[in-house]
Image (cartoon, rainbow, N blue to C red):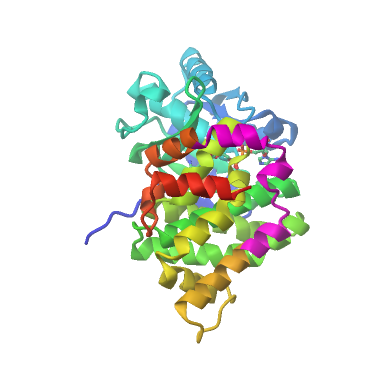
Amino acid sequence: MAREFIIPGQIISGSGALDMAESKLKTLGKKALIVTDKVMIQLGNAAAVETALKNQDVDYVIYSEINGEPTDTMIEAGLALYKEENCDFLIALGGGSPIDSMKAIGALVTNGGSISDYMGKVISIPTPPMVAIPTTAGTGSEATQFTIITDTKKDIKMLLKGQVLMPSLAVIDPQFTMTAPPKITAATGLDALTHAIEAYTSRKTQTLSDTFALSAVKRIFEYLPIAFHDGKNVTAREQMSVAALEAGIAFNNASVTIVHGMSRPIGALFHVAHGLSNAMLLKECLTFALEGAYERFAQLGRAVGAAKEEDSDKEASEKFLKAVENICAELETPTLEEFGIDKEKFFSVIEKMASDAMDSGSPQNTQREVTVKDVEQIYRNLW
Ligand SMILES: NC(=O)c1ccc[n+]([C@@H]2O[C@H](COP(=O)([O-])OP(=O)(O)OC[C@H]3O[C@@H](n4cnc5c(N)ncnc54)[C@H](O)[C@@H]3O)[C@@H](O)[C@H]2O)c1
Ligand SMILES: [Fe+2]
């Protein structure tokens, strides 16, 4: 069966990527809206982007109000600024939150309406040019056609999509990730691991996405613990930046599955950072998913050296699950309880969370059939 494989218009990666990208920025427009957060300003990362624009005589205005995972109200304010300032292209600097915000603002500039109008639809009118500069080795949003925005009225993390949301230019400079503290390194790195595992074991896998997913899983197992324990290790940071990009490319073309589907409702209702809610779910969700895809999980187990060639697929996939549990433990992933979530409150919203998870469509990409009752049970198993 023929399949499409979608990647960003252009990718510049490695140390010095921003310098190399500088001359391209000029070709994208006259005035940029830089979508970022306050941390990027404090760290001087925004100043580096400003310098690049000034060097090219490109005008800009900064929108730095992405103070958490993006909501519909943050998007409206960014859109208003874009219009007021007569911008004609967008640059996102930061983790997945600023990058997703940029995509949502860009979508509204040309598609109109409010962001919630696009829930369950395909965003189709091309956005102004968009440049994504990730500072976490995590979401891979620089290489995906997705944006995740919280609807504050309904308490839902909406998964919105459209090929037009692919950035025109992705600038992956690992230098920007060096300052990420261990907790953010862990959560975002485990997000990337989840993308790669889900892409490799989804119903929508394809040969090319497998290549990227497998490579990402291997790289993350090798380098994420190093980046977590020693944030100044340049090699580990470089390798994690590549891995997050690979994982983004993989799930962009093969989708995510049950973990992401169940993770978004936890994020929306309990404000757990995206990567962390994935990590909290990995063991229980993969225990469930394993049964439908022993062969695929076994290949991952052998690829990361957790299983031997002679192990049966069932044994090898169980060893892979154990290896995932070990890396989550090494990266000090808390349980929901340790994170401070109230058990009673959690149980009172399990039905809503299960229904929202199924509505997102992601759990249905799991190779084993998933029912709403299964999802409810997995939520209960987290305690
Ligand atoms: N579009 C997609 O394909 C996709 C995929 C996965 C996740 N997401 C979304 O991305 C969002 C999460 O993004 P994220 O995990 O990258 O986190 P984030 O962008 O929310 O950033 C988390 C925190 O880390 C800080 N930070 C970022 N880079 C830093 C650095 N280099 N040094 C120091 N601090 C730094 C930020 O300022 C922020 O306080 C969620 O909303 C999630 O749903 C999107
Ligand atoms: Fe994710």
**109 over 359 or under it: above or below:** above
**259 over 243 or under it: above or below:** above
Left or right position of 168 against 18: left
Name the residue: 38% across, 48% down.
Answer: 371
Image-quadrant location for residue 235? bottom right
Q: Which sits in the foreground, 367 or 150? A: 367
Q: Residue 14: where, in percent of width, then height? A: 59, 55
Image-quadrant location for residue 211? bottom left
Q: Which sits in the foreground, 352 or 197? A: 352
Which quadrant of the picture is home to ligand 1? top right
Q: Can residue 173 be seen by looking at this rendering? A: no
**187 over 314 or under it: above or below:** above
Query: Principal SS element in the magenta part?
Result: helix
Left or right position of 338 against 77: right
Name the residue: 52% across, 19% down.
Answer: 73
Q: Residue 287: where, in percent of width, then height? A: 52, 61
Q: Quadrant of the N terminus?
A: bottom left
The reply to whether the magenta stretch includes residue 349 is: yes
